[in-house]
Amino acid sequence: MGLRLDRLATLYVSDPIGKHLRPRRTSIPILMYHSISDERRAGVNPYYQTTTTLKVFAEQMAYLGANGYATISPAEAAVVLGNNAEASRKNVVVTFDDGFLDFYTDAFPVLERFGFRATVYLPTAYVGESRASFKGKPCLTWSEIRELRGHGIEFGSHTVTHPQLYDLEPGVIEEEVLRSRQTIERELGCIVESFAYPYAFPEPDVAFKGRLRETLRQAGYRNGVCTTIGRPDARSDIFFMERLPINSGDDLSLFRAKLEGAYDWLAKPQYLVKKAKSWVGSANS
């Protein structure tokens, strides 16, 4: 495992300082997983890895269970945060992006062992009655999704084709968010209210966020998550709730720190990097 500066800063600076200075407001960690597998992208910094081994995932779920966490849905999290009331229990939201088959074969049995729920966000172009693949990995089929739904797993939209929405025309964005929702509702016979933004979320562009929020609302969504780092609280936009990226590099010390808010510091440098990139892009256009 490569050197993780984010881990060092979190455990040895943010965590000890935050225990005394972190604001005491209601916040809910939303964990962002992708694939449960032993695969690791060669030459990619541990921070950017998107896979979690089954062993590490099981350890993380066991930690949640041993420490009294209850899993809730994004919709339930939005209600708690909207009321801005002191939570009566330790809540956590478990989410999976991309709808990979290994959620069914590996993640779900672990979740079921601990009585946990999760929300899986589907890019519907890669889900069918027969097996399809996305990013070189097999995806869930509708029959597997229906089975999971029967066991309490929720499903949300991750667009149709998983594009970077920021690069698309408004009409194409509308098609991506509306058609994916309609497809999932038709296949599962239930209302779909949650949306996950693919790729890096352009939070510095306030105008884009406003347009997208209205597009999502018009399409029938009531909440959503994105890739902005942190734990959402009463100040968060419920259509773009922050999440905590999780992978095999998160040992239990870092996992605990993320749950308790010590990783939230990274949101500010993440924002500044995106802001700088937008300035450079504007200067070169």
Image (spheres, rainbow, N blue to C red):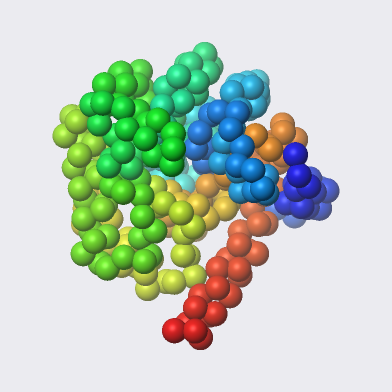
Residue at 20% over, 36% down: 185
Q: Is residue 106 left or right of residue 164?
A: right
From the image, which quarter does the N terminus lie in?
top right
Q: Quadrant of residue 38?
A: top right
Query: In this rendering, is residue 271 above or below 161?
Result: below
Query: In this rendering, is residue 11 above or below 57?
Result: below
Counting from the top left corner in percent of width and height, residue 189 is at 18, 29
Residue at 26% over, 26% down: 130
Residue furthest to the top in view is 113
Q: How many marks?
A: 0
Q: Is residue 15 visible?
A: no
Query: In this rendering, is residue 150 above or below 256?
Result: above
Q: Nearer the viewer, residue 8 or 117?
A: 8
From the image, which quarter does the C terminus lie in?
bottom left
Counting from the top left corner in percent of width and height, residue 13 is at 81, 53
Residue at 48% over, 16% down: 109
Counting from the top left corner in percent of width and height, residue 128 is at 25, 31
Q: Nearer the viewer, residue 54 or 148?
A: 54
Q: Nearer the viewer, residue 32 or 36?
A: 36
Counting from the top left corner in percent of width and height, residue 82 is at 42, 49
Q: Is residue 160 visible?
A: yes
Residue at 42% over, 22% down: 104
